[in-house]
Image (spheres, rainbow, N blue to C red):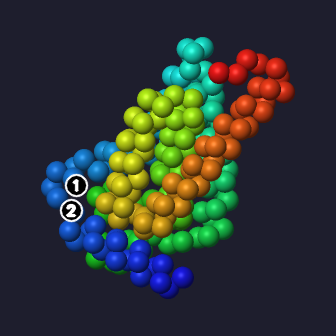
Amino acid sequence: MEFIQSIDNSIFYFIKDNMRSGILDVIMPVISAIGNGGTIWIITAVILIFPKKYRNIGITVGVALILCLLIGNLTLKPLIARIRPYDIDPDIVLLIPPPKDYSFPSGHTMSSFASVTAMFWYNKRFGVCAFILGSAIAFSRLYLCVHYMTDVLGGVVIGIIIGLAAVLLVRLVRKKLKLKQK
């Protein structure tokens, strides 16, 4: 565990010491805010539910976000209880208000990649666009000093697993209800 923490610290300080710039100090809080509470993904899911052509995508993204809340935010974060980088280094000046929950996994990243996976499953073009935004949101969390790299990587992996689970769950429910699959 010490080895992983040393790698996390190296990456954290590399980003903090070498990548900070005035323009990114303005852009990254905005990108991160887009992912707050999964808002962008919730809005996307709601919009996609209305046209029948994209309804499965919207429903699956919604299911994935509910699973992220239950598995990530309500179960894993309190269970693992990893403190955030700024709690360890008092010299860190945050560009955003400090998050109140624990660090692992990154909820922004997890909800982004659960949504990305669900969208990509049904529509590659939506998935690629979502991947670009999700990756920017994930990086913003590192840039803003609120997560370690393993928090973000954990969010990616857990998010992908949750996205796939949501696809399977929606397909199973639709099959049980004998609804047409798309």
Side (left or right) of 45 relative to 128 = right
Label 1, label 2: how far apart the Cα atoms are: 7 Å
Residue at which label 1 appears: 25
Percent coordinates x, y for residue 54 in the rendering: 56, 20
Depth check: give the residue in front, 139 or 22.
139
Percent coordinates x, y for residue 32 in the rendering: 37, 48
> Which quarter of the rendered picture does the C terminus lie within?
top right
Residue at which label 2 appears: 20
Side (left or right) of 89 relative to 20 = right
Give the answer, above or below, for where 11 lies relative to 43: below
Mark seen at residue 114: none
Is any part of residue 37 visible from this angle?
A: no
Residue at 22% from the left image edge and 63% from the top image edge: 19
User: Looking at numbered disc 2 in the image, what kind of residue is underneath it?
Assistant: Arg
Residue at 59% from the left image edge and 55% from the top image edge: 158
Quarter of image, res 171: top right
User: Looking at numbered disc 1 in the image, what kind of residue is underneath it?
Assistant: Asp
Side (left or right) of 26 relative to 83 = left
Q: Secondary structure at mark 2?
A: loop
Viewer-nearest of discs 1 and 2: 2
Q: Residues within 10 Å of mark 1 (few under 14, many from 20)?
A: some
- For marks 1 and 2 on the same chain, the one whose residue lies earlier in the sequence: 2
Give the answer, above or below, for where 150 lies relative to 174: below
Give the answer, above or below, for where 65 lies relative to 29: above
Q: Residues within 10 Å of mark 2 (few under 14, many from 20)?
A: few
Depth check: give the residue in front, 148 or 83.
148
Depth check: give the residue in front, 94 or 9.
9
Give the answer, above or below, for where 9 lies relative to 156: below
1 and 2 marks in contact (CB < 8 Å): yes
Percent coordinates x, y for residue 92 in the rendering: 30, 72
